[in-house]
DNA sequence: AACGATCCCTGTTGGC
DNA sequence: TGCCAACAGGGATCGT
């Protein structure tokens, strides 16, 4: 499912396709996709005719700058995907949003599970949105080990849960959180406040490493999920995963069977030997 | 304030 | 073969 690397690849694609172009026709066809505006009608009306200055990203949110000062916000949720192509191409099932650009190309948002959305916000609406509550971006911003150590010093929740909290750090999801904890040698059930500054430093290095690798490899395309590269091919990062989805298989470092536990209703995968619970 | 549970949603999968 | 329950999870919301 889309996490920071997949959203970053999508951002580059959308920026290439949309920057400098206007949205000549906008049509949203699913109420849930427009749920952060009053509805499809308002979303379409406020976007219609606007030009896109550029497409940015914070955490897993896409944020496009429009020529009238509004912000085009989108989130891929679990199954959201943007395509850019000829408007005459057959439309995939679950296409909930489309916009025809002034160069004749069409941008579409396809999202079977409708956890994703498209929205347009003015500055006040943006302030009240989830985007404004995000912590530092896990890839763009340099997090200092001492600052994060201090921020976690009051937190008793498992580090895995804290990594998924977008207020702590923005952009990690279930896959890359598990991968980063493995590389850093930290058990997902360790309490945030119990981590040493050295462990936090290892964790930040590991986060940077897994995100760099994932972006370089075109993101992670799981068998049954919707993320694909802009050209429709599967991303190749699945082969690089060392713990996610490998429950009961041998750890690639030490051979011990990878374990799976549920933390905050999310599956967590880890090596009980490389990621000991007691430091 | 922090934490954990619950809900939303549908394609896929596994059991019978 | 067909049916159906279980499962996957990002973020919002709510109760404790």
Image: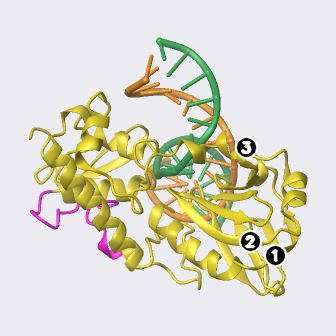
Chain colours: A yellow, B orange, C green
Which one is nearer the viewer's eye here, B8 or A181? A181
In the displayed structure, would residue A260 be above or below residue A158?
below
**Contact, CB < 8 Å: mark 1 with mark 2?**
yes
Q: Tell me if residue A253 is in the magenta stretch.
A: yes
Say which element carries label 2.
strand
- Name the chain under label 3: A
Which one is nearer the viewer's eye here, A40 or A49? A49
Is the residue marked by circle 3 packed among few (<14), some (14-19), or many (20+) residues within 10 Å?
A: some
Say which element carries label 3.
helix
Residue A22's disc is: 1
Residue A208's disc is: none
Q: Residue A102, position in %: x, y? A: 84, 82
Residue A52's disc is: 2
In the displayed structure, would residue C14 be above or below residue A182?
above
Magenta stretch: give its range. Answer: A238-256
In primary-sequence order, the first of circles 3 and 2 is 2
Question: Residue beneath label 3, please?
Answer: A125
Q: How far apart are marks 1 and 2 (CA)?
A: 6 Å
Say which element carries label 1.
loop
Q: Tell me if residue A172 is in the magenta stretch.
A: no
- Residue at image x 91%, y 54%? A41
- Name the chain under label 2: A
């Amino acid at each position: 499912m889309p996490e920071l690397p997949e959203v970053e690849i999508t951002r580059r694609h959308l920026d290439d396709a949309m920057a400098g172009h206007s949205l000549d026709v906008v049509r949203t066809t699913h109420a849930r996709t427009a749920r952060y505006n009053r509805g499809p009608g308002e979303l379409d009306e406020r976007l219609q005719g606007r030009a896109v200055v550029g497409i940015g990203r914070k955490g897993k949110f896409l944020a496009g700058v429009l020529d009238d000062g509004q912000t085009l916000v989108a989130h891929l949720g679990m199954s959201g995907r943007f395509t850019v192509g000829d408007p005459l191409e057959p439309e995939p099932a679950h296409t909930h949003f489309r916009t025809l650009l002034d160069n004749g190309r069409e941008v579409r948002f396809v999202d079977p599970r409708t956890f994703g959305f498209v929205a347009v916000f003015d500055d006040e609406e943006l302030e009240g949105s989830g985007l404004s509550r995000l912590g530092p971006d896990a890839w763009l911003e340099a997090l200092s080990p001492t600052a994060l150590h201090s921020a976690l010093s009051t937190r008793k929740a498992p580090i895995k849960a804290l990594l998924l909290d977008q207020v702590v750090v923005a952009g990690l999801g279930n896959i890359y959180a598990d991968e980063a904890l493995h590389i850093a040698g930290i058990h997902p059930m360790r309490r945030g406040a119990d981590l040493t500054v050295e462990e936090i430093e290892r964790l930040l290095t590991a986060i940077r490493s897994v995100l760099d690798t994932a972006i370089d490899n075109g993101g992670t395309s799981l068998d049954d999920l919707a993320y694909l590269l802009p050209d429709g091919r599967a991303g190749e990062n699945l082969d690089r995963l060392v713990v996610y989805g490998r429950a009961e298989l041998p750890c690639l470092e030490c051979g011990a069977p990878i374990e799976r536990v549920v933390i905050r209703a999310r599956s967590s995968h880890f090596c009980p030997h490389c990621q000991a619970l007691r430091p």
